[in-house]
């Protein structure tokens, strides 16, 4: 299984704390490493440890690959740790990134000191779910936007409005716009990420600390799907959890 060369940033602490385990923060679908920039800096300052901010494969400035399985995404994360000479780290992933973190904890348990998954549960949501159909519609709208509309945020936003009525979601998607090149940066692969290999179900249950955080939306994650009770996720809470790990 080929490992994609991920684009990533490293935030270094001004006052490093000895033996502090690094933290890797991973964005979700349609996102990039910029989504966690402010939280990453705050965690770095407070924890006194390195914070890694990668782009998932087929997102941001990372390489594109037709293989978009969670297993491959997990291997990519370990590749980042290898490039930085890091033996193990705390992995925190949001949404799609959370699934990649779950896979990494199963495939590479000795490299994961702790796991934090935000807005996602260890279940199969199904390719026919309303949320996934909405994601597919968004991808289609971005792909259908005419090249001339991608020269500015204003015209690109107008092109998205018919399919994406929520202004906040449009602003989030516009982070992927490269107006000088009249195109989107790599947003996502053309297909739904393949579920984690069923054979992983026979793997030993990871023993590292694990926390599942969710917003007040039951379709994202709920207590019956989690081994620990779900609690509202906020940047402040994320920071406290990182400090406790």
Image: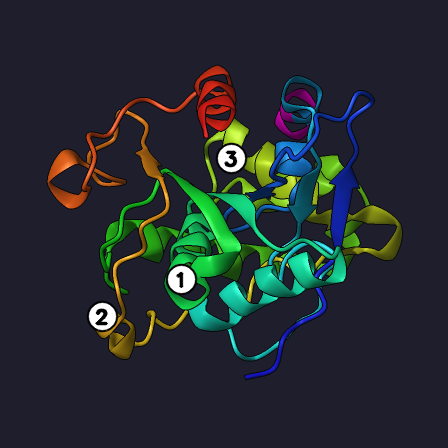
Is 59 placed left or right of 180 in the picture?
left
Marks 2, 3: nearer the viewer? 2
> In terms of depth relative to the viewer, which is nearer, 159 or 56?
56
N-term-proximal mark, 2 vs 3: 3
Q: Which residue is mark 3?
A: 169
Q: Are marks 2 and 3 in contact (CB under 8 Å)?
A: no
Considering only vertical position in the picture, is 28 above or below 214? Answer: below
> In terms of depth relative to the viewer, which is nearer, 181 or 236?
236
Q: Which residue is mark 1?
A: 103
- For label 2, the SS is helix
Which x, y percent locates residue 99? 39, 55
Main secondary-structure element of the magenta-colored stretch: helix
Which residues lie in the magenta part?
Answer: 39-43
Q: Which residue is mark 2?
A: 201
Q: Quadrant of the N terminus?
A: bottom right
Residue depicted at x 76% and y 42%: 10
Which x, y percent locates residue 125? 24, 56
């Amino acid at each position: 299984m080929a490992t994609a060369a991920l684009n990533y940033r490293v935030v270094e602490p001004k006052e490093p704390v000895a033996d502090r385990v690094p933290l890797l923060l991973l964005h979700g679908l349609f996102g990039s490493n910029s989504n966690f920039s402010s939280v990453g800096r705050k965690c770095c300052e407070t924890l006194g440890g390195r914070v890694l901010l990668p782009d998932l494969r087929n997102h941001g400035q990372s390489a594109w690959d037709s293989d978009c399985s969670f297993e491959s995404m997990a291997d990519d994360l370990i590749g980042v740790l290898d490039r930085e000479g890091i033996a193990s780290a705390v992995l925190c992933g949001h949404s799609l990134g959370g699934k990649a973190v779950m896979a990494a904890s199963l495939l590479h348990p000795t490299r994961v000191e702790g796991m934090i998954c935000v807005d996602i549960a260890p279940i199969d949501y199904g390719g026919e779910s309303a949320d996934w159909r909405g994601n597919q519609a968004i991808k289609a709208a971005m792909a259908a936007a005419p090249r001339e509309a991608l020269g500015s945020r204003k015209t690109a936003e107008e092109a998205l409005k018919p399919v994406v009525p929520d202004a906040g979601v449009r602003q989030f998607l516009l982070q992927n716009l490269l107006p000088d090149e009249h195109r989107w940066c790599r947003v996502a692969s053309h297909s739904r990420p393949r579920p984690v290999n069923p054979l992983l179900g026979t793997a030993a249950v990871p023993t590292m600390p694990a926390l599942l955080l969710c917003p007040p939306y039951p379709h994202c994650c709920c207590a019956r799907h989690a081994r620990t009770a779900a609690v509202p996720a906020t940047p402040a809470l994320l920071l406290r959890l990182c400090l406790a790990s």
